[in-house]
Each structure stands twice: as C-alpha cells, then as structure tokens.
Image (cartoon, coloured by chain):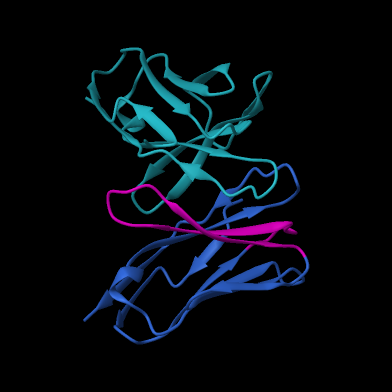
Chain colours: A blue, B cyan
Amino acid sequence: QQPVQSPQAVILREGEDAVINCSSSKALYSVHWYRQKHGEAPVFLMILLKGGEQKGHDKISASFNEKKQQSSLYLTASQLSYSGTYFCGTGEGSNYKLTFGKGTLLTVNP
Amino acid sequence: DADVTQTPRNRITKTGKRIMLECSQTKGHDRMYWYRQDPGLGLQLIYYSFDVKDINKGEISDGYSVSRQAQAKFSLSLESAIPNQTALYFCATSDLVRNEQFFGPGTRLTVL
C-alpha cells in the first residue's frame, strides 16, 4: 500500500522553511527520500532506518518515527534549487523493495 | 559517462506492437528495478531483480515481462502495447550496503 504524503503541493519564497510528511499504515524498516526535478530522474537525498534516527545534510534533514510509521523531511532556509517533487519510499523489510508515495511538489519563488 | 543508461529515450508505438525497453548499468550493483511514472501517481514498481537468477513481480506487473540477461542488463517488454501503458519508465539500481537507488534518465513511451 502506497505511503501517504502531505501536503500534495507547497509554494515558498526563498528563505522560508517547509516540512513534508510521509505516513504508512504498515510497520516500516526504512524510509528513503528522493527529489525529482521536472524532466529529470529522481535523485537520492537520504535514507532513515528503523531506530528513530534523524539525518541531515546542509539545510535538509529528516526524521523517522517507527512507532507511528511516519517520516518528515525538513527543508530550512529554502533555496531556488530546492524546487521539485519530493518522494518518500518506504521499505517494510531488509529486502529493500520500496513503495513510493505520490509525491509533494515544492515550488520556491524568489 | 552515465552509470545507468536506458534505451530508447523516447518511443512512439502503436497498439498491439511488441516493444522492449533496455537498461544497462556500470555501477556493479546486483539489484535492478523497473518503475512506471504517471502524473500524480508517483513511482510504481513493475518488476525487480536482486540478482541474475531472481526476478520478482512488483505492484503493476500485468502486461509486462522482464529479462535479466546479465548483472548489468535488465530489459522490460510490453508484449502487446496498449494506450494506457503510455508513461515514463525508469530503471534503477541499488547496492547491498547503502541501498540508495540510482535512476536512469527514463524512457518516455507513447502508445497510440
């Protein structure tokens, strides 16, 4: 079953923050986050494994609450380059087959 | 050079035709995947392979078949194409350690 992402779309001005949520009805082993720019392939951002860890690099970070089967992606001080569609992919076990959400379209305006 | 390549990049075909999409990788990964992307639906898994002798159906395998010719090559076939198979198709690979997926550039398929 597909994880549910919210919001479906968000529009920001440069420098503003955003949070994208990913929720599953199944127990999760891992959550992946990818970003896809228009007309391009998805690009890996980060992976979070069962254990509730938080990861991040630069101004993009994420958390994983395994008890709630939820993950959140945090984008702080957004830049124009952050624009794109963000997908979460959830894995139920170590076999690494992922199920992707429908995506969240993020638009950052000057 | 790209690590994951897909051919063709664009294809227009007619209903009922057989078509093959090819994927090659130079990353040395054992795991390969085929996804379909439709606007607003995200990425849906068609087939995946964890090694040359292991092929598994994904969420939407009906109407598709695959062949893993070698570690580096994974092909997707539509035996008799139909218009609702018009979509963007991505191949991806992953390794056993980090498991991040690397996507090819995609093949845009139109079935008339």
What residue sits 65% from the left and 50% below the top? B98
Q: Is residue A49 left or right of residue B111?
A: right
Task: Using the image, determine if residue A110 lies above or below residue A83.
Answer: below
Q: State the image coordinates of residue B54 (x, y, percent, origin top left).
A: 68, 23
Give the extent of the magenta segment.
A24-50
For this rendering, which residue is in front, B70 or A89? B70
Is residue B39 among what the camera can see? Answer: yes
Q: State the image coordinates of residue B90 (x, y, percent, origin top left).
A: 42, 37
Image quadrant holding the C terminus of chain B, namely top left
When asked about the image quadrant of residue A66, the answer is bottom right
Task: Using the image, determine if residue B40 lies above or below residue A53.
Answer: above
When asked about the image quadrant of residue B20, the answer is top left
Task: Using the image, determine if residue B107 lies above or below residue A58.
Answer: above
Q: State the image coordinates of residue B21 (x, y, percent, origin top left).
A: 39, 22
What residue sits 69% from the left and 57% below the top? A30
Q: Is residue A32 magenta?
A: yes
Q: Is residue B105 magenta?
A: no
For this rendering, which residue is in front, B25 or A53? B25
For this rendering, which residue is in front, A64 or B64? A64
Q: Is residue B17 left or right of residue B58?
A: left
Is residue A73 among what the camera can see? Answer: no
Q: State the image coordinates of residue B70 (x, y, percent, origin top left).
A: 57, 17
| Numbered marks: total | 0
Image quadrant holding the N terminus of chain B, namely top left
